[in-house]
Every structure is written in C-alpha cells, then in structure tokens.
Amino acid sequence: MDTSKSAKNKNVNWKQNLWVTWIGCFIVGSSFSLVMPFLPLYIQSLGVTGANVELFSGLAFASTALVSGLVAPMWGKLADKYGRKPMMVRASFAMTFTMSAIAFSHQMGGYWWLLLMRSLIGFFSGFIPNSTAMIASQAPKERSGYALGILSTAMITGTLIGPSIGGLLAQWFGMANVFLIVGALLALATLLTVFFVHENFEPVAKSEMLSTKEIISRVGDKHILFGLLITSFIIQVTTQSIEPFVTLYIKTLSTNTNNLMFISGLIVSAVGL
C-alpha cells in the first residue's frame, strides 16, 4: 500500500466520500442529459424559426462542451492549489443558478440568454473530473480500481436515464420548469458535497507540477494515446451530433405530438446504450 497516501487520508472515510460523490455525479450527469429531448423545442418557443432551429440548437449544445474544454486546464491548476472538494462545490453551486436561469429565457433575452447560460454551465463545470481525482487519491491502492469503477457508473447511469426522465418531466410540468427542477437537484448535490464529503488536501508543490508537454513525454507508447484520443473523438462526434435535431426529426414523422418529448428521450437514451 502507498504509505504516504494512506497517512494523508487516515482520517478520511473514503467509502462515504465514494457514495456521496456517486450521488453527486449521478445528479450532475443526469442534469445535462435531462434537457436534451426538449431543448430544441424550448429554443423554438423562444422565437427561433425555420432552419435556424437546428443551427441554434447545435450552438447551444456545443457551447457547453467547447467552453468547458477551454477552461478545464485553469480549473485543474486551481484544484491542485486549493483541493478537489472546493472545485466540486464551486461547480455544482454555480450550475445550480445557471441551469435554473435558463427557465427565465423568455423574460431575460430569449435565445441569447439561453446560449449565455449554456456557456456559463460549461465555464463552471468540473464536478465529475474533480470527484474522480479525489476518490482516486483517497481510495487504498488495492481498491482504487473498484472505487473508480463504481464512480464511473454514476455519470453513465445519469446520462442514460436522464433523457427519458427529462422528456416525461417536460410533458408533466412544462419545459421551463424542468430547468428549475434540475437546479434544485444541483443544489442538493452542492449541500451533500459541503456537509458529507471530506478531504485532507495538501497543495501540489510547484516543483512537482508537470506541463502538458512533460506529461505526454512520459507516456510510453504515444501511438496508443493518440489512437484512443482520435477514437474517442469520433465516437463522441457521431453519438452527439444527432442530439440537437433528433426531437425535431421525430416531430416530422408523426402528427401525434402528445408524447413527443418522452419518445425523443427514449431515443436519446438508446444512443447511449
């Protein structure tokens, strides 16, 4: 066993942290997928018409991931300096308000308000990566595979069932209200993290920090690394590319739109399988 790691986390209940962060990651993962089935219809309700609906839906979906990717290194450096738990609280707390604010798009500026909030969601994201890093650092070496495997099921499960649940909620309570429901769930994730997740954090010394170039230089077989990156990129592009317009496409296939959002949610969930 890694004795330095064991000593640092001696007073930390890593199993409690694992299950609390599992709930948090499930909520965060499902919060992104809950809105997928009806987001194009919500954008349409904001006054976007014609072919612009597909275009603007694509921009709304892409903005979150694009901004998240751009700021991830910044949040990573802050996590090394201040700890994983503060970054988890920061992410879920900020997303509580940005996700809820989308419910008021009709009053605040229409589509451009929605796009701004989606971009801010990406800007403040980082709950799941920091959860993973924290559990990896706390679990005993011989149990780290088990712990990370359990944690990975949280986002997968949330992403899979989120669209179906989101479609139902949108039909029952209205599209705008789903954003408020998601905001409430993210607030719950924030409170659980604040009160039930514990971390004995020691800042990473500057002398121990490695640049991206140094990290890549230490990889044994770079062909495998870049192969995995390219493969993952292709898979993500192919699976995510239909989400901005799948609901609109289903709408053209039938005149019965009573269960449109639920059916769209089932189809989006099926893609994840």
Image: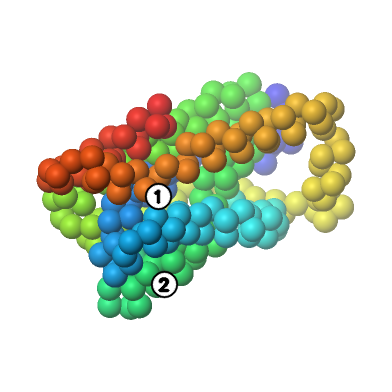
Q: CA distance from mark 2 to mark 1?
A: 17 Å
Q: Which mark is residue 191?
A: none
Residue 150 location, x and y as percent? 48, 28
Q: Where 102 sits versus 191, above or below?
A: below
Residue 156 location, x and y as percent? 43, 34
Q: Which residue is drawn at the image coordinates 37% and 69% (left, top)?
A: 111
Q: Quadrant of residue 224?
A: top right
Q: Which residue is drawn at the image coordinates 59% and 35% (left, top)?
A: 234
Residue 212 in view of the camera? yes
Is disc 1 placed on a helix, strand or loop?
Answer: loop
Residue located beneath label 2 in the image = 112
Mark 1 neighbour density, 10 Å: few (under 14) some (14–19) many (20 or more): many
The figure's colour scheme reads: rainbow
Disc 2 and disc 1 in contact, CB within 8 angstroms: no
Q: Which residue is drawn at the image coordinates 87% and 52% (left, top)?
A: 207
Residue 16 location, x and y as percent? 45, 37
Image quarter (top left, top right, bottom left or bottom right) of the C terminus: top left
Residue 266 location, x and y as percent? 28, 35
